[in-house]
Amino acid sequence: MKPIIACLLCTLSALVLAGLPGRAVGDSYSPEVLFTLAYGESLEQIGVVIPEPGEGPAEGPGSIAVGPDGSVYIADNMNRRLKRFDQQGQLLMATEPNVENLHYLTVDGRGNAYGLVGGGLGTLAKFSPEGEELWRMGVTAAIPEEIRRSYRGLLHGVFVGPEDTICVQITSEPRSLAVFTGDGEFVELVPGDACTPTGRIFALGSVPGQEFSRDVAVFDFAGREIASYRANSLAADPAMFTGVPHGLTWFMFDSDHLYTIALAKREHTIQLRGRRLHIYLDTVITRHDNAGNVAAYLRLPAAPFPYGRHETVDQQGNIYQLLYGENSVDVVKYLANTRVADISSLHALPSLSRGGARYIPLRMIAKYCNMDLKWNPDAKQVTLSSDIGGDNPRQVRLAAGDQGVILHYGRLWISMGAAHDKLGPVFKTDANQQIAYVERLSPKRVARLPR
């Protein structure tokens, strides 16, 4: 009898999201598919455009944000609407189809949404939680002439400040924030790159020769310094940044924390509405605590569209992503601060939740439990062979649509229950019911399972 083979299985993101190397217990994220939206033109769908080769890039949603009640706002630019869904995917509102090119979406404490609209993204628009467009205004024109004379830059972000004020980032040097009330009245121009609802202003400075580091100064709106530190994203895990050509490219903020974003070169291929699209970038997200230390990190596939922000973070630190499939997009929530005990080896493609069940990639089970796997891409079927049992290896064929088997982002995933019944692994979970590791059953117990 062969000994039980123990294998570690991370509970992390669509590629890797984990605590720090060398820590027995790390802050992690656990992914959950909240809901799925089909591509199309109806109110309950999301628009995508896949042009013929040579006729331009594919295009899809321009931005995602999360409201204080957890509802998910999506800029459905192909259908010219802003839409709002609850976390079960029920449509709560859709604006009239007159919203052009909405980006940098953000939501205040009352559920009002703000974003830059129009061809040049120079206009700030406000929408109520019910979908009424409350106002639009030209940001530069709203700043008094004597103030804006020295600040001629592009608008590059929208953030919610204290008491539902709105900060619009202006990229001129020195970089600054134009602060407005919720009614669109100009308040002041302050140095910085972003603001938070807790009254913090973040100012980020580059570090010569260290493209993955930023000097961070945190102030209140009175200009008093709260914190100062250097955020080094490579402190997470240098291997996470393999293939990153240009350092950090973007930043997100929850109530108090900085998230740095980099784009890494790693090719993915997905079928999207009948066409095969190649994605050459991953998104690498690193969360920093208030001293600049790396608290958690994530590497996940980028969107097939070159424009828009397809990730966001809520005020509790949960990350949301639009993950694109052939005929639909998943809205995925990565739950913050899941404690996973005794994880020391981290691998790609974790578990995910869908419809109340937890699924694991078949490829992961095969790799870490000594099973041979053959993949038939045309039939979307795998054949798994186990050497447990001696001279008569057991074969199991599984395909998308089988009980407990789903196709997710081009790979087959199997539920914990179906994997136990058909393949024989035993799953160990932590206090939050996340999968910590997997053990193979002994040959005697495997023999008693239905074949």
Image: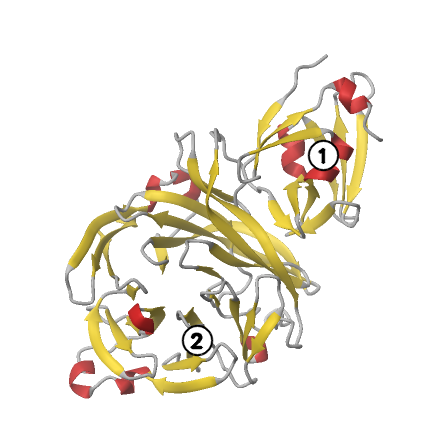
Q: Residue 380: in sight, yes or no?
A: yes
User: Along the horizontal axis of the image, is 264 left or right of 224?
Assistant: right
- Closest to the observer: 399 or 334? 334
Q: In which quarter of the image is residue 123?
A: bottom left
Q: Identify the disc placed on residue 360.
A: none
Write down the quadrant of residue 35 in the picture: bottom right
SS state under label 1: strand
**Residue appearing at x 29%, y 62% in the figure:** 198
Give above or below for 359 relative to 184. above
Specify the color scheme.
Answer: secondary structure
Nearer to us in this view, 6 or 209: 6
- In the rendered view, does 221 fall on the left or right side of 427? left
**Which residue is at the front of the view, 9 or 262?**
9
Question: How far apart are labels 1 and 2 at the CA level?
Answer: 50 Å
* Pointer 1 residue: 373
Counting the numbered discs, the total is 2
Residue 176 appears at what percent x and percent y?
23, 70
Regarding mark 2 in the picture, which secondary structure is present there?
loop
Instruction: Say above or below: 82 vs 217.
Output: below
Q: Of label 1 and label 2, which has the lower sequence position?
A: 2
**Amino acid type assigned to the residue bearing label 2 in the image:** Asn
Q: Quarter of the image for the N terminus: give it.
A: top right
Residue 344 on image: x %, y %: 47, 29
User: Disc 1 vs disc 2: Cβ atoms closer than 8 Å?
Assistant: no
- At x 41%, y 81%, the residue is 125
- Per the image, the residue denoted by label 2 is 112
Query: Looking at the image, which residue is at 23% across and 65% down?
Result: 192
Q: Which amino acid does label 1 sit on?
A: Leu
Q: Is residue 246 visible?
A: no
Quadrant where the C terminus lies?
top right
Whole-percent x and y of residue 416? 68, 38
Identify whether 242 is placed above or below 182. Answer: above
